[in-house]
Amino acid sequence: GNIVNALASLLHEKAYAIPLIFVIGWRGEPGVKDEPQHAYQGEVTLPLLELLQVEYFVLSPETTGDEVRAAMEGFRPLLEQGRSVAFVVRKGALVHDRKVAYENGYALRREEAIRTILDAADEGDVFVSTTGKASRELFELREERGEGHERDFLTIGSMGHSSSIALGIALSETKRCIWCLDGDGAFLMHMGAAAVIAAAKPQNFRHVVLNNEAHESVGGAPTAAHSVHFPALAESLGYRVLPSATTAEELTRALTGFAQGDGLTFLEVRTAIGSRADLGRPTTTPTENKEALMRTLEG
């Protein structure tokens, strides 16, 4: 999905004719249980490749090495012409036995950080949470607290866009405080959005980056966040920046800064990698989530 623009312009033989071999995980493959955000993209994965004139070979758990080599030989003439090709990987087709455990040295769990933030928020505040486990934890914390979900927007899929969604709400709901619970990987993916937010300067926008230096929801592989100073970046863009928090105590102190003055504010929270084993998933549908929030904002 993200590569369509480059495939239809930069890489195409009518432009630079740069051949690439894509390895595409087939999330949302029809007939395979997956998350709602993958359903449509899974349906159109093969038709989209066909539309873009990208020849493909589907890898399944039964595919043999000889079949892969034969597919690669068939791809060679296309690559020599400057055309791209793709291996589309079904669930279970590529596996390894080595277990990898990622860690970063920080002790504060993300769920505990979100719990502390909820405690500091006012009843009418609206939350927009990033793709992955942060949204799942926000949903479960609302359940634990006996609260509804009508003040939250859970950004499923569309990684990196939660801050833009929060900006839109903040600009239209100026009397409400809007919290964006962002992730380090998501923030980096669409970092230009932070510049747009800072330029707009919504006085009711609170941007929290939960930074564990990892793409945790897809296995915990490192992001580039270990080399990024998020507070300095936010300050250079024009945010009011609070001291970063690495412990529950530091987070509690930092959150008092939100109450001490209005204005576009940024807070980085350094969190551990990992979530509890029994973390569930939202029991409402994305459409129900959207409509409940719309009713809240219209009220």
Image (cartoon, rainbow, N blue to C red):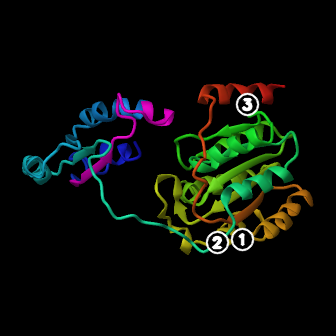
Residue 68, given in percent of the width and then of the height, sits at 13, 49
Tag 1–tag 2 contact (CB < 8 Å): yes
Taking depth in this image into account, of 197 and 148 the one nearest to the observer is 148
List the residue tagged with mark 1.
246
The earlier-in-sequence mark between 3 and 1 is 1
Local packing at callout 3 (Cα closer than 10 Å; few below 14, some 14-19, many 20+) is some
List the residue tagged with mark 2.
106
Local packing at callout 1 (Cα closer than 10 Å; few below 14, some 14-19, many 20+) is some
Taking depth in this image into account, of 112 and 8 the one nearest to the observer is 112
Question: Judging from the image, what secondary structure is the residue with disc 1 in?
Answer: loop
Callout 1 amino acid: Thr
The earlier-in-sequence mark between 1 and 2 is 2
In this rendering, the answer to whether 100 lies above or below 205 is below
List the residue tagged with mark 3.
293
Rendered image quadrant of residue 255:
bottom right
Callout 2 amino acid: Tyr
Residue 231 lies within the magenta run: no
* Magenta region, residue range: 18-39
Callout 3 amino acid: Leu
